[in-house]
Each structure stands twice: as structure tokens, then as C-alpha cells.
Amino acid sequence: MAITTTRSLSVTPVTRRSATPINPLRSSSLSYSLTRPFGSNLTLKVPSFRVSASSMSSIHAPESASRTSFLDRRESGFLHFVKYHGLGNDFILVDNRNSTEPRISPEQAAKLCDRNFGIGADGVIFAMPGVNGTDYTMRIFNSDGSEPEMCGNGVRCFARFIAELENLNGKQSFTVHTGAGLIVPEIQDDGKVKVDMGEPILKASDVPTSLSANKDQSVVKSELDVDGVKWNVTCVSMGNPHCVTFGTKEGQNLKVDKLNLAEIGPKFEHHSVFPARTNTEFVEIISPSQLKMRVWERGAGATLACGTGACAVVVAAVLEGHAERRCTVDLPGGPLDIEWKEEDNHVYMTGPAEVVFYGSVLLN
Ligand SMILES: N[C@@H](CCC[C@H](N)C(=O)O)C(=O)O
């Protein structure tokens, strides 16, 4: 695979797909070579990869016309991409508007997401033709190759990617078909993206969780035994499943910086009460309008931010009586503004999405 970078740092519901992990180590090998057209090159040789990259500080951002022509290039065998991030939750964005099938397989996506042998990302996102009257379809593979239904930070990156592909400037709004149904991102004048994330799903069997419902049909502040420790959990789906905890049965308010996320995260993700696995958010209450969270994502592990997770956290905090309907959620990568509106029961998320670099990979 050859990677070229040209930019410096600077509806209707659908059937849910299962998130089945792919082990990248067991999949067939891809070869990489990275080249940057600007600055001095550093070449690293690794088995079946050739990597060539220059330091970020020596790269200059090209004019927008050259960015567009870069995205238009269609050499056979090359996959052109733009890497974006939303508060450090990073994605490889692929222009897939000419096909309803993703241009790469889940195994290839897992390879590209590898932070040592690939580009490095939390997932690969495909911009595809819309269905049922929507403008576009967004599909995503997690870094383990599994396919989630939705991604909050990803859809903000998706909106900025579409604006770039279509050469749009200023305020823009799109309808996007996802595995979680219709999602509507709107690029605002300040460049941030506000997303109508739809209604949270609280019915236990739809989250899905086999924990018994204890409030209407939902699971709110229920006991979950994880390796002998009893946690209070609230289960929320934002199209994808989330288990939100504000602490253990005995414990006081969580201090999230003290958690050993790498140890406890996987125990929640693979707990038998979550048949589709789960994302887990550990939350510290700073005030009724400020929550601090760390996340262990299904199929991606610890990430710097999770948009659907931040939405699920505010819904859970309201249901448990900890917070107001509008909160700032502080994630390791930065803050998101989340509002669960009473009028329409929809959750709205506002936050940034930024280009990291442009590149191309030779797939073989
Ligand atoms: N890992 C998640 C999907 C990605 C979520 C994302 N980071 C976000 O911002 O919402 C899953 O498997 O559900």
C-alpha cells in the first residue's frame, strides 16, 4: 500500500448489523509505502511495508483546488483518503459515492487502522450514495474490522468530508442514512458540526441487553457484576449500544482519571449481558451541566472521544437524576455540547471535525 499525504496538521431505520471482530493478524497481508510530496522524506522498511513520511512541521497546506484534484485522482489500485479527527477520535474517510459496496474489506480496514503498520485510526468511514431519498449513506468499520451502526464523531467528520468533496462552503446540512437510521449533520458558520442524533433507544431488548428492565422497559441504575465488582449501570442505544456507569454500588462519585480502563473496559465490552458487545462510558459528575467521561469502545478500545457515547451519557445522567438536559461533556480529546431536547426527544451533539492529512494507499 502506498500512502501520499498532501496536507499538514493545520429515512428510515435499517436492520442493525452485528459487530463481529476481524483479527488483523490473521488476515492476508497488504503492502504499504507512504510518500509525502512536501518536505524531506524519511523511509522506514518493514516486512511488506515501505513507509516514507516527512515531519509535520515541514509540510505546507496546498490551495483548495489542489486538494480537490487530489481527491479526484483515480489511479487503479490506489485508495485515496483523507484522515480526519473529531476530538482525537480519528478516521480514514473514503470517497465511495460511486458504489454501494465499501471499496475495501473489513480485513483491509483493520490493517489500515493499525497504528504501527498502517495509517493509524479508530475506524474507516465510507461516503456512499444515499438511499430512500437521503443525500448520502455513511458506513463505518471499527479498527478491529467490525461494523457498528453509527458513529457520532465520525458523522461530523463525514459532513466536513462531503463539503470538501462537493466544494461547498459555509453553512451546510445533509441527510445521512446510517445503520442507526436517519442522521442530520449541519455544518455551522464557525466550522463546528451540529448533529441531530435522533431519539435514544431505552428498551432493554433493543439496546440490546439481557439485564432486566427496572424502569418502564429500560435498564436504569441497575446492578451489573463485573468480575465480582458491582457497578450501577444504565443502558442506552444511540443506534449503537452503550453501558453508562457513574460508579460502583459501594463507591462514591467516580474519579475517572484513576480507572484502569485497559483492564476493566474489555470486561464490560464482552460481558454476557451484552449480546452485541457494548461501548462503555465511565462518568464523573463535575456539576449538573458538566460531566467528565472516559470511554472503552466496542471494536476500538480506549479512544479520545466518542460522540454517541457522550449522547448516551447525558441521557443516562438525566434518567439517573444527575444532570440537566444540556451539558458539556469533557472527553480526553476535548468537550462536546450535548442536549437531549424535551420537545422532540432527540439528542443534539455539537463539536469540531478537522482534517489531519490527505493520503493514498496502494492496495494489493
Ligand atoms: N465503536 C463504536 C462505533 C464508533 C463510535 C464513535 N467513536 C462515536 O463517536 O460515536 C461501536 O462499535 O458502536
Image (cartoon, rainbow, N blue to C red):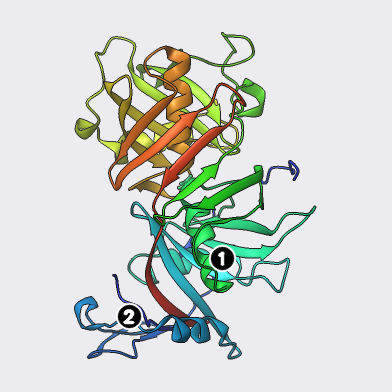
Amino acid carrying label 1: it is Ile
Q: Quadrant of the C terminus?
A: bottom right
Q: Is residue 194 above or below residue 28?
A: above
Residue 61: mark in rendering: 2
| Position in image of residue 46 (x %, y %) | 32, 82
The residue at 56%/53% (across/down) is 146
Q: Residues within 10 Å of mark 2 (few under 14, many from 20)?
A: some
Residue 162: mark in rendering: 1
The residue at 49%/62% (across/down) is 170
Of labels 1 and 2, earlier in sequence is: 2
Locate residue 47: give its quadrant.
bottom left
Amino acid carrying label 2: it is Ala
Q: Nearer the viewer, residue 58 or 351?
A: 351
Q: CA distance from mark 1 to mark 2?
A: 19 Å
The residue at 48%/24% (across/down) is 315
| Position in image of residue 196 (x %, y %) | 57, 41
